[in-house]
Amino acid sequence: MTDKIDFGTEAWIQQLMVELNNSEDYAEAAKNWEGDIYFVVEPKGSQLTEKVYMYVDLWHGKCRHAEVPDDPTKFKPEFTISGTVKSFKEVIDDGLDPMKAMLTRKLKLTGNMAKIMRNVKSANQLVHCCTFIPTNFPLE
Amino acid sequence: MWYFRSPEIVFGEDALDHLDTLQGKRAFIVTDPMMLELGFVDLVAAHLTDAGLTVGTFPDVEPEPSVQTIRTGAEKMLAFEPDWIVGLGGGSAMDAAKAMWALYENPGLDPADINPFEPLGLRRKARLIVIPTTSGTGSEATWATVLTDTAENRKLGTGSPEMVADIAIVDPALPAKMPPRLTADTGLDALTHAIEGYTCSLRNDFSDAVCLKAAQLVFEYLPRAVKNGDDAEAREKMHNAATLAGLGFGNAMAALAHSMGHSLGAIFHVPHGRAVALFLPYTIQFIQRGDAETRFHEISRFLGLPASTPDEGAISLVTAIRDLSREVGQPLSLKETLGDGVSRADFDAALDALVANAEADSVIAMGDRIPTTDEVRQLFEYAYEGKNIDF
């Protein structure tokens, strides 16, 4: 049985990088994507004591870098996607459509919205890769 | 959690009379030159004047309205300072009214930055009434707006949940003068909304109900409305069907046929309804051949078509759509749609752009099977030749 990886940790974001770089579907869907992202995990309703910032640098279907920085000002990514652990779990684990999560503001997106709207296929595949990671979500 | 958003819908004979009861000071009509010519602008303005409002008009919305037109209209709106905005016409005029409204409330906003994820803060200055004069676009019931980015030669499909109109006036007298070809184009647009709304990833119980009813009405009444424009019952039912389908896909989403249709429309200027309906049978076949559970057979069952299995139901639906399209004089292949003026070489030369535009359309990811780039290309090629999808 595979050990689960805690969501919001360096190990989790590194595993996401592996999954993205192993995925032909992601490579195909995101072949035109250029942009880095912060996943900002809010502590509300979880065992986290503070916000966690998970960084991924996505470039033409590959993940060039992933990190949970000690200092969130280390990166100034083009996009941020923020939400509680519960909201991320609903999308990654429970099949909530990412578009629906954003439309209902469960996940809040900042950045160039027009660019996101032109790249929904790659966003869906990014979420799909997250589902491959056996994840422990640190809910209360 | 999800939402079902709808304007207050005033429908049926003499629905325009509702305008007499409006309370406000200044109304700004966003429309197109044809509405002026048909006398519809004067008709609506007379009702608004009866209600005690001062009326201004922007009659310059072109088909597939450009971002520049939106900016120009919004500037005129800012000068006029309306507390009611009235979108009068087909989808282009209503979509333009929505986008101008967003800029009127947010001067300096780039239309490309309108999105469903961030608040626009509408209704601080004005509210929106939409009055469809065609039966198909559904824009009167949705928060979407489709603009044309002439610089990039592509459609810009966007919107905000705040952009659902306050009031939709669905008066069957207005589409009664539509010529048969426009009746067919717009009616099949409504059918595409109904079917994609029922089968897209954001479908829900509320949108399902209106999608099914809309599809049933289109199959029953569109041939009558095309054959005899004076058939008042058919006109009224088709007008209602279009708004129901708008409510359906507006509260769910459109899907692959729309992404391909938008792309085709931007490059070859095929009317929207004709374009999306052309692709619909092909995209149903493509989705049905995927691994996901589909729901086309449920639509077929509701329509009384053979549907003992999902595959049989999907085939029945494709056949019924093609029969309907043929009955109302619509093309079944892209080659037929483009006609002699566009050669195979012209099509091949545009194929990269057709594929890229379709892939950049957010609804491409809203179906039960999301195509790869190669599959989008194949879909266009098969549709061009009129070949059934076998991949």
Image (cartoon, rainbow, N blue to C red):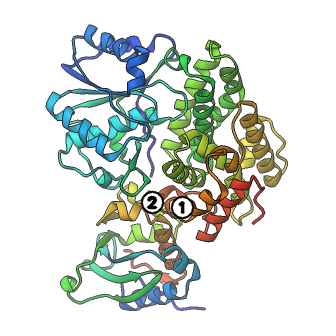
Q: Foreground residue, A48 or B345? A: B345
The percent coordinates of residue B363 (x first, y second) are 51, 55
Q: Is residue B270 left or right of residue A17?
A: right
Q: Is residue A45 visible?
A: yes
Q: Residue at x 55, y 24 (%)?
A: B239
Occupied quadrant, residue B233: top right
Q: Nearer the viewer, mark 2 or mark 1?
A: 1
Q: Foreground residue, B363 or A135? A: B363
Q: Which mark is residue A68?
A: none
The image quadrant where one finds the C terminus of chain B is: bottom right
Occupied quadrant, residue B16: top left
Q: Residue at x 56, y 25 (%)?
A: B240
Identify the amino acid type marked 2. Answer: Met
Q: Residue at x 47, y 24 (%)?
A: B133
- How packed is label 2: few (under 14 Cα within 10 Å), some, or many (20 or more)? many
Above or below, B166 relative to A53: above
Q: Residue at x 25, y 80 (%)?
A: A49
Q: Foreground residue, B385 or B297? A: B385
Occupied quadrant, residue B210: top right
Above or below, B84 relative to A88: above
Above or below, B127 relative to B322: above
Q: Which mark is residue A99?
A: 2
Secondary structure under badge 1?
A: helix
Secondary structure under badge 2?
A: helix
Identify the amino acid type marked 1. Answer: Ala
Estimate the spatial distance between the alpha carbons at disc 2 and disc 1, rounded to whole Å: 10 Å
Q: Which residue is mark 1?
A: B365
Q: Chain of mark 1?
A: B
Number of dots carrying numbers: 2
Above or below, B4 relative to A9: above
The percent coordinates of residue A81 (x first, y second) are 33, 70
Q: Is residue B115 left or right of residue B290?
A: left
